[in-house]
Structures are given as structure tokens and as C-alpha cells.
Amino acid sequence: MLCCILAEDPLSICIACTLQSCLNKNTYSPEKCDQHLRTLYKCCQSMYKQTEGKGDSSACPMPNVVKRWLKTHGEDVS
């Protein structure tokens, strides 16, 4: 899986833009965008792990939000 590593990595911005496009197209069916959201959150989780929770990206929610979402959607958050 491709992951964002740096704070303002263009890949994380690209993933976020792809997610936004999907949500715009599927206004009444956001569940169709779950894979895009999962990819973004996994990318964010990777960045937070590599920066010991101190990373910052305009495309990523706070670390605890990412961790909680991944956990409730069946992902390993250890």
C-alpha cells in the first residue's frame, strides 16, 4: 500500500481529493466511498506511527480519530 510519510505529502492530498470526489458523486450513498476513506486513514495511521503521533497533514484527522475509525472498521491499530 502506498502511504504518506511526510506532513504535507502530495499522496495524502491526492487520496483526500479522490475521497472528496467520490463523496461528491455519491451524496446519498457515502458507503460507496469506504475504500477511499480506509486508504486515507491507513495512510494517516502510517504517518502518525512514523512521527510518533506528532505528524501533521491537512488531509488527516487527529490521531485518536484515525485510530478509533480504523478499529471500528476491523483494522489492526496496534
Image: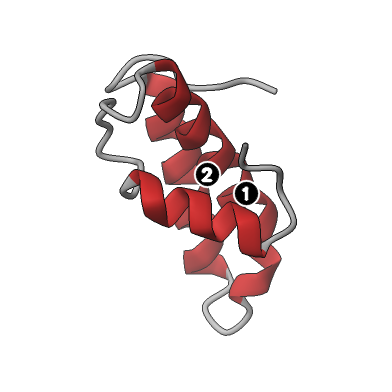
Please tell me whether residue 68 is drawn above or below residue 12 in the rendered image.
below
Q: How is the rendered protein coloured?
A: secondary structure
Q: Which amino acid does label 2 sit on?
A: Tyr
Locate residue 34 relative to residue 7 in the image: left or right.
right
Determine crowd level at label 1: few under 14, some 14-19, many 20+ residues with C-alpha closer than 10 A: some
- Spot occupied by residue 35 in the image (x, y as percentages of width and height): 69, 52
Q: Which residue is drawn at 34% across and 49% down?
A: 61
Give the secondary structure at mark 2.
helix
Residue bearing the label numbered 2: 41
Residue bearing the label numbered 1: 38
Q: Quadrant of residue 54?
A: top left
Q: Residue at x 57, y 84 (%)?
A: 28
Q: Which amino acid does label 1 sit on?
A: Arg
- Spot occupied by residue 62 in the image (x, y as percentages of width and height): 31, 48
Q: Which residue lies furthest to the bottom in this view?
A: 28
Determine crowd level at label 2: few under 14, some 14-19, many 20+ residues with C-alpha closer than 10 A: many
CA distance for labels 2 and 1: 5 Å
